[in-house]
Image: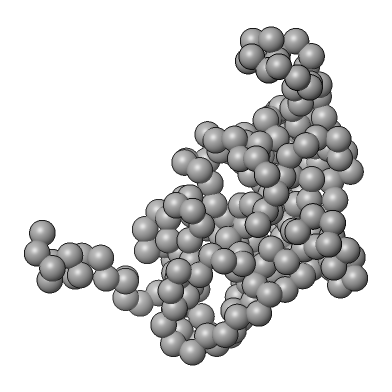
Amino acid sequence: MDLEQFTRENAPKTGGDGFQLENSKLLDVALDGTVMAKAGSMVAYEGDISFERKSAGGLTGMLKKAATGEGSVMMEATGRGNLYLADQGKKVQILSLDPGEEISVNGNDVLAFDSSVEWDIRTIDSIAGVTTGGLFNVYLEGPGNVAITTHGEPLVLETPVSTDPDATVAWSSAVSPGVKTDRNIKGFLGKSSGETYQLDFSEPGGFVIVQPYEETGPAQ
């Protein structure tokens, strides 16, 4: 492939408003105002755009930031132009939330959302004893677009269902997880210490998004 062909075939798509995919791992936000994005996710921008780190929940958000490092997981991008976002080569999924529709997303997996989306970081008390990055989740309420990231193609399961905490990306607000403990499965998996936990979504009528990858550690 010669240079002219390479630049032509990999140039940004023209037209479009709001959120659109340049490819499966790169989000293009046509910005005219404000959008929230994961801190550190900007790979490029065109136009006049400024950035400011944000914490959710006022004083509560600041306390969570001090305790977990997750309170400042987002940055606010303001201006006009095209903002290109990506996160460690993960696939980008764009969701459209209706007014009042809410989803809970692991802090590692939130890439961006419209300024019209209400957000907060909340403690998931029911899984406080599970040592994963999912102790604090980002709750997002529409209307507006939300971009989340997954390692590989996601799988959306209806509840009731049990999932691996480290593979769980998000769930609908209609359900809230409890914890199941299996002391025996660790023998099959070669676990040398501790107990094996699963998130238990026992309430029907909701959904859970999982990915084919176990993502450990808190959001950066």
Describe residue 10's horizontal placement relative to residue 83 as left or right. Answer: left
Determine the residue located farthest toward the front in the rendered image.
192
Closest to the observer, 172 or 44 = 44
> Looking at the picture, does residue 104 appear above or below residue 114?
above
Residue beneath the point at 19% across and 70% down: 8
> Looking at the picture, does residue 12 appear above or below residue 190?
below
Residue 78, x across and y down, in percent: 59, 84
Residue beneath the point at 52% across and 85% down: 49
Residue beneath the point at 79% across and 68% down: 56
Q: Which color scheme did the rendering employ for the protein?
A: one colour
State the image quarter where residue 96 is shown: bottom right
Confirm whether residue 19 shows in the render.
no
Quarter of the image that includes the N terminus: bottom left
Residue 75, x across and y down, in percent: 65, 72
Describe residue 124's horizontal placement relative to residue 32 as left or right. Answer: right
> Looking at the picture, does residue 36 appear above or below residue 164?
below
Residue 160, x across and y down, in percent: 73, 29
Residue beneath the point at 70% across and 49% down: 218
Describe residue 205's horizontal placement relative to residue 46 as left or right. Answer: right
Quarter of the image that includes the C terminus: bottom right
> Looking at the picture, does residue 164 appear above or below residue 19?
above
Closest to the observer, 173 or 107 = 107
Tally of numbered discs: 0
Confirm whether residue 167 shows in the render.
yes
Closest to the observer, 139 or 137 = 137
